[in-house]
Amino acid sequence: ALTEENLLFLEAWRAVDRAYYDKSFNGQSWFRYRERALRDDPMNTRQETYAAIKKMLATLDDPFTRLLEPEKFKSLRSGTQGALTGVGLSIGYPLALKGSPAGLSVMSAAPGGPAEKAGIVSGDVILAIDDTSAQDMDIYDAADRLQGPEGSSIDLTILSGADTRHVVLKRERYTLNPVRSRMCEIPGSEDSSKIGYIKLTTFNQNAAGSVKEAIKKLREKNVKAFVLDLRNNSGGLFPEGIEIAKIWMDKGVIVYICDSRGVRDIYEADGASTIAASEPLVVLVNKGTASASEILAGALKDNKRAVVYGEPTYGKGKIQSVFALSDGSGLAVTVARYETPAHTDIDKVGVTPDRPLPASFPTDEDGFCSCLRDPASCNLNAARLFVRS
């Protein structure tokens, strides 16, 4: 007879069997794997069952199909709803400048969050998380490690300028506003041309609404062109990515959803939620731009709606659905892959920008504005910013 642990294992097996996008299951018989695991893998405790599930998922050779133990699953669910349990840090890959320290860059610290209270600021570098070096750490892995149960502690090794320090932070719940925006003026022209800068840090439930709000506020200040900064935005909710593309595009394909048999779904802009289809638009990307961000950047680039600046993006061209298991854990399963409107499969290659960004280019809104005021300081030709060639 099957035990409770066996049944949990079967639940996970069945979720993958039904939903996984590659029906060859990485070239193996999925049914045979199930029989063999039930016969040979120990499943006497919950931890042994989790180990058996992880071992099974590893045979798919897909890092995004993974088991989320109950605490992780809980914090992932709250994160996409706009509230996170963590330390209030947005992280990204550091600028690859010679002699720069290896680790992960702090992009911003949420106002009032644990990290900000501890004096961690944009530009600091995380060298280690709980004694694990962040040198070659993947941005997803790091984000996973930073989140956890409310009230639990985490030990960070931080480099600020030339000083290295240890910081112990207590995780708290905090709300994430995904958008920061401001108006930048370029001096010299008659009405000194005004550019609206919008930095989108994640695609949570508030994302599309916040972008619309930012566009409206900037328009009230007579902004005539926009810059959308998606650098180090590692994605989030797929539907929000689609909604934000529709804000900037009144027609055209946004993304193709494909499974092992080819295209199975097409998302298109229909003009219904468009509020900014004509103003000049620049999109900034880097290798920390992933998932829903890549869908958005790819759609705006392939439809010639925006000029994309930066470096090739992360290359996460797969879409996961999350399934709840009966014990409170969850399973993230890759259910499809996507292609840009020009049929580029993003996976592992990313979106290629139209033009590179100078290495010295600032990552925050104040730096961006000062760069436009003094373009020579960051090797940028402001007059040609919105020109595609």
Image (cartoon, helix red, strand yellow):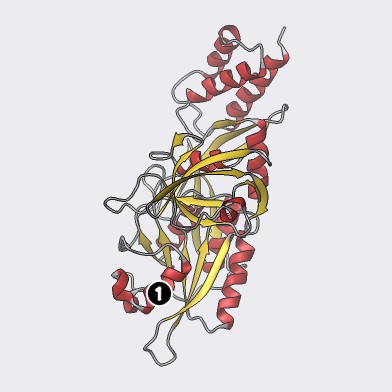
User: Is residue 358 left or right of 284 when viewed as pictured?
Assistant: left
User: Is residue 92 left or right of 9 when viewed as pictured?
Assistant: left
Q: How many marks?
A: 1
Say what amino acid the circle numbered 1 marks.
Answer: Ser
User: Is residue 201 left or right of 305 when viewed as pictured?
Assistant: right
For image coordinates 59% across by 48% down, the residue present is 87
Badge 1, how many Cα within 10 Å: few under 14, some, many 20+?
some
Q: Position of residue 272 (x, y in %)?
A: 62, 68
Q: Image height check: is 55 above or below 333?
A: above
Instruction: Give the residue furthest to the bottom.
Output: 190
For image coordinates 53% across by 15% down, the residue present is 33
SS at mark 1 in the image = helix
Q: Position of residue 209 (x, y in %)?
A: 64, 64
Q: Position of residue 162 (x, y in %)?
A: 37, 52
Q: Which residue is mark 1?
A: 370
Q: Image height check: is 335 above or below 286?
A: above
Confirm whether residue 270 shows in the render: yes
For image coordinates 68% across by 16% down, the residue present is 5
**In-front residue for pair 18/72:** 72
Instruction: Give the residue furthest to the left.
Output: 98
Residue 136 falls in image quadrant: top left
Q: Position of residue 69 (x, y in %)?
A: 63, 30
Q: Image height check: is 158 above or below 117?
A: above
**In-front residue for pair 233/18:** 233
User: Is residue 259 left or right of 386 when viewed as pictured?
Assistant: right
Q: Please identify the quadrant where the N terminus is shown.
A: top right
Q: Please identify the quadrant where the C terminus is shown.
A: bottom left
**In-front residue for pair 245/107:** 107
Q: Image height check: is 136 above or below 365?
A: above
Confirm whether residue 250 shows in the render: no
